[in-house]
Image (cartoon, coloured by chain):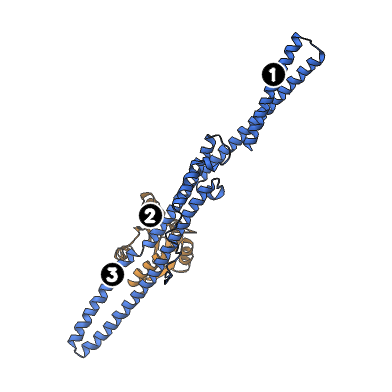
Amino acid sequence: MIIFDKKKKRMSLALAGGVLVFTGFQFYRFLTVDGSILQAMSIMISIALIVMLLKLSKTVYKSEISTCRQRDEMNENAFYEGSALVSKIPRNNEIAEYLANIKDELGQAEQLVNDAVTNLVVNFGYIRELTNSQRDIVLTVEKMAMSDDNAEVVKLLRRQMMMAKKIEQELATTVTSMQFGDLVVQLLKHTESQINTLGSVLQRIDQQNIQERNICQADDECNEISYATIKMKKINQTRPVLQQGLQSGEVDLF
Amino acid sequence: MEKKTILAVDDSASIRQMVAFTLRGAGYEVIEAVDGQDALDKANHHQVNLVLTDINMPRMDGLKLLELLRKLTSYQSIPILMLTTESGGDMKAKGKAAGATGWLVKPFHPKSLLDVIGKVMH
């Protein structure tokens, strides 16, 4: 749209220039050779044409300024809108797509961590139940053995009881480590929000870059950010992990 | 002796389970809530002796829950502990101003958690 307006402006100015030269020549002939009424009228029409063309060029210039102002306002808004911008106005598709892929991978990592933690918690609960059952059995057998005055069995059961206590202590320590899932998920969410901010900043720089080059349309070939993004995409084409959960992997026999 | 009841609030299922495991193992009754709103609903239906809540949660965060609980007559003197990954001074100050009894940073160690709960409940 702006390129079209610019062309109109240039054409109007060129035409005005041409008519001005023609008028000057007519005026010269009017003064020096044969000043007819027809020539005088021709000069007046030419002057009117020049004025019209100049006015037209001025209108086109105003329209261009207004469009650039609108674009500036959009950029300002983009800066303040932050992460929301990426989804609202993906002006540079390369950046938007690249960052969306990174976010997908973060989501995948979150899913894997959640699955791992869920499985660990289930296993943890089961081990705890078994430990409690074992302790109860040992206590019961110990009572029975004591009544029969079986010293050797009581000794063994006490050792067993000590082991059960050790397992319980280890389980208590595991409680601290088991909280890693929550911490990792929160960090992943924070990273995702930072990527959103980075996306909006990149989009803004991209727009500024276009304006500075005075090219009022997205031209991916001369856009350095797009070029860099495409290059990064080519380097990271293969995903090292495709699994979405922690189910057992496939087995291929050759 | 009657068991003391603790309301444990966290959007992370694994954290809720770890907290519940620790507290039940020590003889407490545990009510679990998945976020601030759920906790507020449960707090209105049960009388609890202590609230242990996370901060960053969907629907209603822990600070808002704290603020709303302190407005309820039955929760004005109940200990409310914040159990969170947040360790910044500003956040702690907000918690203190809103009426938190204490602040524990995750990951918690079961013994430390039980010690703190023991202290604030007796």
Name the residue beneath numbered marker 3. Answer: A170
- Mark 3 is surrounded, within 10 Å at the Cα level, by few (under 14), some (14 to 19) or many (20 or more) other residues, namely few
Mark drawn on residue B122: none
Of marks 1 and 3, which one's residue comes earlier in the chain? 1
Counting from the top left corner in percent of width and height, residue A12 is at 68, 27
Name the residue beneath numbered marker 1. Answer: A21
Taking depth in this image into account, of A230 and A139 the one nearest to the observer is A230
Counting from the top left corner in percent of width and height, residue A156 is at 21, 82
Apparent colour of chain B = orange
Counting from the top left corner in percent of width and height, residue B86 is at 38, 54
Q: Type of residue at label 3?
A: Glu
- Residue at 25% across / 73% down in the picture? A166
Discs 2 and 3 carry the same chain letter: no
The chain letter corresponding to blue is A
Name the residue beneath numbered marker 2. Answer: B86
Q: Secondary structure at mark 2?
A: loop
Asked which quadrant contains residue A241, the reply is bottom left
Q: Type of residue at label 2?
A: Glu
Q: Secondary structure at mark 3?
A: helix
